[in-house]
Image (tube, rainbow, N blue to C red):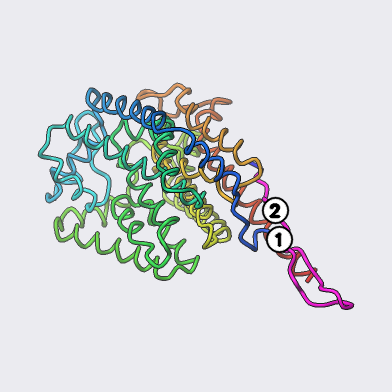
Amino acid sequence: MPWGIRRRSLDMEMGEHHGAGRRQSAPSDLLQPPEPAPIAERLESVARNHGWAWPIGLAAVGVIVATVVAAVRRQLDLNTYLLGGQHAFSTDLYRVVYPPTHLGFTYPPFATLWFVPFTHLPSRVDQVLFTWLSLAVLFALLAVCLRVTCPRLERRTVAWWALLLLTPAGLLDPTRETLVLGQINILLAAAVTADMTLIRPQRRGVLVGLAAAIKMTPILLIPYLVLTRQTGAWRRALGAFVAAGAIAAAASPGASWIYWTRDAWGPNRAGWLPWIGNQGAVAIVERLFHHTLSTVPLFALCAGIVGVGLYLAVKLYQPSLPMLGFLVMEVTESLASPVSWAHHMIWVIPLIAWLVLAVDRPKHGAWWAVAVSAVFFAAPIWWVPHGPHVKYAGHGWSMLLAGSFFIVLVAILVASSVRVAARRGAAGRFLQSG
């Protein structure tokens, strides 16, 4: 994905030479680019010249369909969460399994506490209520993405477009799989995205820590906060993570001990890792070579990806434009995690918004957004024969389909590397010419 660097020249006074002001052009990435007013104006114009019928009507269609599906179809993951809620205060939390899938609760003990209140309701009621909650949070995530990538938008315009895009966003594979399974991904993605991009640095970190206490993968954002020198943010994130763990330990000391001393280090409890739905680097390698990785190469692969991703994210971080560094970290999480199911990749929504709207988006960003949307809507990973009797899905050219989400992830890291290299080259030339 050859992302270009959007450039603008800014004349800067560097001194006087022969009585005239000496001016030089600074590389655009060293300075904050101007707000792309035409994009904001177009969005404002569309929202202003049209009433609420289209956004409300389209959103209503999505809500109705999702509600019907939740009412008639069993949400396997939500029912596993509810099973965890039923055993939240028991030492057998990580031993019981949900009969239809024979899988047990795999998240940290703190996550179970959120589901305890729902265990007293009928399963179908829980499914409908959780679906409505997920859709409301999806609307909030869209609003956050619009606000962060295009800050000039009025609140009415943000709400208008977030409603209009609710159903299309729900049709992307990670979102629709999350809704069908009753997964918690939308809630965590919205919390982390808001914390890392919308909330001011002086208050940032708490939601990241709580998200990591519910599901471990966001914990990678804490070293990112450290390396980008967001001191207060990483301390708040770490404090929230530790405090949440302490609350869970007080509520269920036995289960907490079992999780942190054993289950947290065993990713295979989440299921068969080479399954086609796993789009992380570990699963791709295992499907390619048709055998599971032992501990040492698995750790080396994950650690190497984390190191590269952290380096790129830190280099691309800008306090005034925080979205790109955050997206690189989300890609890094998805690649490095041994368990990276396709439905985890809700961050594709902020990615598409950044490609279309952000001032630091790549050249032809809108076209890249169309390509990413097409991949995650069509979801070619499911075109490959797969199922309980297929141990390693994908052979020959079909490996490209089976790993299509993985290919997008790698392309983003490659493009980020190109951008970092180009930025360093531009900065070096500017300093030399100065």
Return the residue nearer the eye: 64 or 278. Answer: 64
Identity, as a three-letter code, of the amino acid under mark 1: Pro
Q: Is residue 167 left or right of residue 20?
A: left
Up the image or down, 91 lies above or below 71; here it is below
Disc 2 secondary structure class? loop
Up the image or down, 16 lies above or below 30; here it is below
Q: Which residue is mark 2?
A: 7
Where does residue 291 sit, x and y in percent of width and height? Answer: 45, 36
- Which of the marked residues, 1 or 2, is nearer the chain's N terminus? 2
Rendering quarter of residue 170: top left
Q: Residue at x 54, y 25 (%)?
A: 398
Q: Which mark is residue 87?
A: none
Bounds of the magenta segment: 3-26
Assign the N terminus to one quadrant of the image.
top right
Mark 1 → mark 2, Cα distance in angstroms: 7 Å
Return the residue nearer the eye: 206 or 25. Answer: 25
Up the image or down, 69 lies above or below 34; here it is above
Q: Is residue 372 left or right of residue 382?
A: right
Q: Residue at x 12, y 36 (%)?
A: 121
Identity, as a three-letter code, of the amino acid under mark 2: Arg
List the single residue furthest toward the right: 18
Q: Which mark is residue 27?
A: 1
Assign the C terminus to one quadrant of the image.
bottom right
